[in-house]
Image (cartoon, helix red, strand yellow):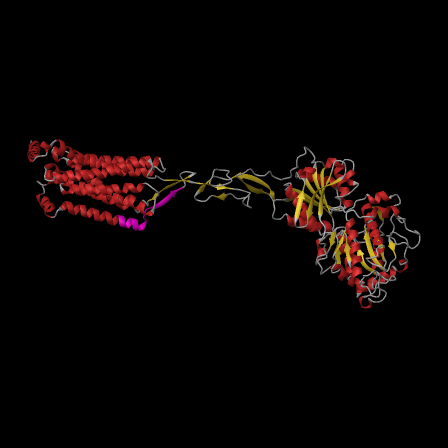
Amino acid sequence: KRVLAILCLLGGFLHHLNEAVTSSEFRLDGDYLIGGLFDIHLASKVLNGDRPETITCSRIFLASYRRLQIMRFSTEQINNSTNLLPGVTLGYEIFDHCSDTKNFPGIFKLISADGIVQPWDQSNVNVSKVIAVVGTYTSTETLTVAPLFMTNLIPMVTYAAASSVLSEKTYFPSFLRTVHPNKHIIEVFFYILQKFNWRWVSFLYTDGDYGKDGLDLFQNMIKDTEICLAYTKSLDENTDYPPMFQQLESQRVNVIIAFTLEWTAEDLIKGAIKHNFTNKVWIAGDGWSLHQKLRREKGIRKIGTVLGVAEPVITIPGFSDFIHSSKTLCQTENPEQGRFCNQISNCNNLTAEDVINADPSFSFSVYAAVYSIAKALHAVLQCGDGRCNRTIPVKPHMVLAALRKSNFTLLNQRIQFDKNGDPKFGSYSIFYWNQIGETEEVGVYHFESFFHINRTKIQWHGNGEVPSSFCSKECPAGFSKTQEGIYKCCFNCTICPSGTYINTTETEDPYNCISCKETEWSDPGSTLCRLRLVEFIPFTDSGAIVIVMGTCTLMGLTVAISVLFAINYNTPVVRSAGGPMCFLILGCLALCSVSVFFYFGKPTSASCVFRFLPFLLFFTVCLAGFVVRSFQIVCIFKIAAKFPKLLSWWMKYHGQWLVISVAFVTQAVLLLISYSITPPKPYSDRLLYLDKTILGCDIDLKSMSGPVIFLTLLCCLCFIFSYMAKDLPKNYNEAKSITFCLMLLILTWIIFATSSILYRGKYVSSFNALAVLSSLYSFLVWYFFPKCYIIMFHPNKNTQQHFQCLIQNYTKTISQ
């Protein structure tokens, strides 16, 4: 109620100013009035802030004056139409809205009737003839005055105010606009930056709601992108430009978005020229992209390349003729009587050509706003068949309801509004300020559907190539980024180590190297991983073929020797070699050789088990047999005389077979325990080579220590007993052969252990198989071959008499 009372008082103050000025470019009588608010002049600075002060609208802006003429022209065009509002005249009341916050007298004039603003409960009495308002220009102006129009739901159709907050219907229920909100032009800025890969940019903006809204939208747009906002600053009439330009130079910012109004842009660009701020890319907002005077300013080429974003220029038919024929251009009849304080042009020096050639920005928006209101009035008055129903009382809210449903074609544009009152029609063009001072269209953006820019039409400053703008150069391929400071565009490059890679085309994280899979490898600084070469010894390997053939030969020899010994079983040579024990040893040697076959081919769990099990188990029997044989020789010739009972017990209980059985069972138990704890299993060695995977078998040395120690113990016992019998009769001296075999065995495994330490590749399996085969051949060749040689080539030495003679000679030697 207090607000309404104040409004009534202010309305009364305006009562003496309600007399119309006929034939004025600011006022046209009609059955229904449209209000118009245009920034024809810029308000003078307030000198004192401690007392009320009258503002002066002094500096003229030709582009805004041109928009005023567009409204006048469109109104006249509508009144001359026989279809749109037949029998109804549309008038206007226009004010020079030169200040953001101090133009309330004109606003009250629009919402008052006879100088009085009616309270809500008396809205049907002395209502203003204004059914809608076109304007204002800036977002701050609109946010300031809009609540006064929203109170009675008077439609306010703005042609330039683009702040996002105006789309909120909760606060601005009767607000509509024929210009797109800021989010769309910010999208165009973003696409341009992406198109030319500019990632280090500055955002300069007009100090006010329009500029701050644009900054907020831009910051949100680039939040999760590689574009960084290096510098931001709000601009007003008091801005000190030299320090700002120095800051931009120090930060190496080469791309500047100037989201400003036209008068702010004039100060900015002239300041850049004056202070020699050169060779930058300027991206202009729709407030100054089509500025006629600025693009021809002396020295404009020095500042760099200017790209502008604005709605495409649409030629309005008949407007030029209207301007040429207008008698009220820059005039007000009876200038000393009845004129309102902000209904004066002060543009006597202007010509019709000046107005026609002025900046055409937002001209179509004004044209569309006026026609939208006229179309809405057409719907409210139910016009048709060459007449309108003038008996219908037209209220602003009725016009608002019809405006929201707008759907008509105007100069090939489909005029419609969405639920927020924002336009569904239109597009943006990208303009380039060419070398001759003209704007050249080089691209287009259709909202949320299509963006294109023809870079070949742009002549860049400098060497003619697309300028770059970055804080840090992009890292070479295979390097990760390490952020420096608060800006993600400022970083150091670190090469990815071997076994990792980074590929910015496939991943959104350029800051971390990705580890390769276990089956892959990479060099330092790689952009991808390659499959490791899997290596093992196949049966087709030449070394494997030789070893397998040697194994088969060993098996054949053991069979042949067994047959030879069986034929000559009762001869002294066979008996002295061990008799039936020879067949056990030969059989175990053949069974040991089976493990050789499992060292080749791709390792499996079964092959890993059988690599070691046959050899460890049956070689234990072989060694136990040689231990027993060595002990028997020593016992017969050296111990029997001293310990006859021992020999008797040995013969009675078949000590040799008992020892061999115990050794076999013990080794079997040890192997069972070790395999139960940690059985051998396939193993992929990826640490040895960067680009290879060596397949082998993994053995737990701790769990396998029992069988190996037991085998070593038997080897030591065998060596001790055989060494004790080194001076026995020649034909009974198997101990010498056993000693030599054991020395070969030890030497073989020492060589294998040494080679395994020095070389760790796929051929370790071949070395292991060769060591096993060499161990078996050492006993076969140096123990059994001499016996076969005597049997086959010296049968005279394979007689009882020959052996008895040797024993007698040994006895004589000992006794002496």
- Work out which quarter of the rendered image holds the C terminus and state it: top left
Magenta stretch, residue numbers: 671-685
Residue 682 falls within the magenta-colored stretch: yes
- Does any portion of residue 104 appear in the rendered image? no
Quarter in which the N terminus is drawn: bottom right
Q: Is residue 549 above or below residue 397?
A: above
At x 58%, y 39%, the residue is 474
Q: Quadrant of residue 153?
A: bottom right
Residue 783 lies, in percent from the top left, at 18, 36
Q: Which residue is the extreme one toward the front?
A: 385
Judge whether 729 appears above or below 127 on screen.
above
Residue 594 in the image: state x and y as whole percent.
26, 42
Horizontal and vertical percent for residue 218?
Answer: 67, 48
Drawn side of residue 706 relative to residue 277, left or right? left
The residue under the point 89% across, 49% down is 328
Q: In this rendered view, identify the residue nearer to me: 206 or 372.
A: 372
Q: Where is residue 376, by image quadrant? A: bottom right
Which residue is at the front of the view, 118 or 186? 186
**Picture quarter containing residue 91?**
bottom right
State the image coordinates of residue 173 (x, y, percent, origin top left).
Answer: 74, 60
The residue that appears at 15% across and 33% down in the rendered structure is: 789
- The single residue placed furthest to the bottom in the displayed view is 121
State whether residue 805 appears in this view. yes
Q: Is residue 34 left or right of residue 182?
A: right
Q: Is residue 170 left or right of residue 606?
A: right
